[in-house]
Amino acid sequence: MTHTAHISHDAILRARVALYHVHPTAQEQVAAYRVLARVSPLAYLPLLAHALSIYVMHEFADRPEIALALRAEAVDAARRMNSLEAGREQLLIDTLKTYRRQLKYMGRQEELSAVEEEITLLESGQRAP
């Protein structure tokens, strides 16, 4: 069974239609890309990571715990993309850097160290653990 077997075709259609609006909101984009990334990860994971970053800035700048969770979701999407397609390290590095900024803002030092180590490994051309 494929991933699409578990996703309603109606949900896929609604997600695609939501993106056809003249100016879909950040929330609409995130919701649509979450669905579509399950169907076509190579096409939609980078868009999901980007949309999550915008959504955080516009809607949750004053709610750090939610912002952190959404930034972590963006990192997860970028990691999945990086594992699926070689040469996508920059997307992962960029999302890790925004995640790092959120961790610094929140004073989460232990997690921050691990993220900084991963960024260093990626920037040096090595694979992160």
Image: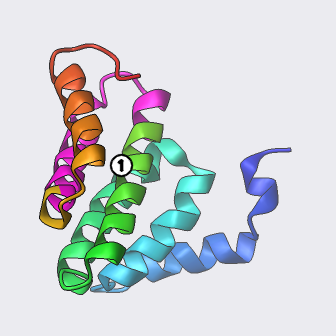
Q: Picture coordinates of residue 128 (x, y %)? A: 35, 23
Quadrant for the N terminus in the image: top right
At label 1, counting other C-alpha atoms closer than 10 Å, the crowd grade (few under 14, some 14-19, many 20 or more) is many
Magenta: main secondary structure: helix
Q: Residue at x 17, y 25 (%)?
A: 120
Q: Can residue 20 be spotted in the picture?
A: no
User: Please, is residue 47 above or below residue 91 in the view?
Assistant: below
User: Please, is residue 55 above or below residue 22 in the view?
Assistant: above
Q: Picture coordinates of residue 69 (x, y %)? A: 39, 66
Lateral position of residue 83 relative to residue 91, left or right: right
Q: What's the image's color scheme?
A: rainbow
Q: Can residue 18 be spotted in the picture?
A: yes
Q: Residue at x 18, y 60 (%)?
A: 107
Is 91 in the magenta?
yes
Q: Amino acid at mark 1?
A: Val
- Residue in front for this viewpoint, 99 or 34: 99
Q: Quadrant of residue 52?
A: bottom left
- Residue in front for this viewpoint, 66 or 15: 66
Q: Quadrant of residue 58?
A: bottom left
User: Please, is residue 94 above or below residue 58 in the view?
Assistant: above
Quadrant for the C terminus in the image: top left
Lateral position of residue 91 relative to residue 82, left or right: left
Marks counted in the figure total 1
- Residue behind mark 1: 75
Q: Picture coordinates of residue 10 (x, y %)? A: 71, 77
The magenta segment: 81-103
Q: Secondary structure at mark 1?
A: helix
Lateral position of residue 123 relative to residue 35, left or right: left
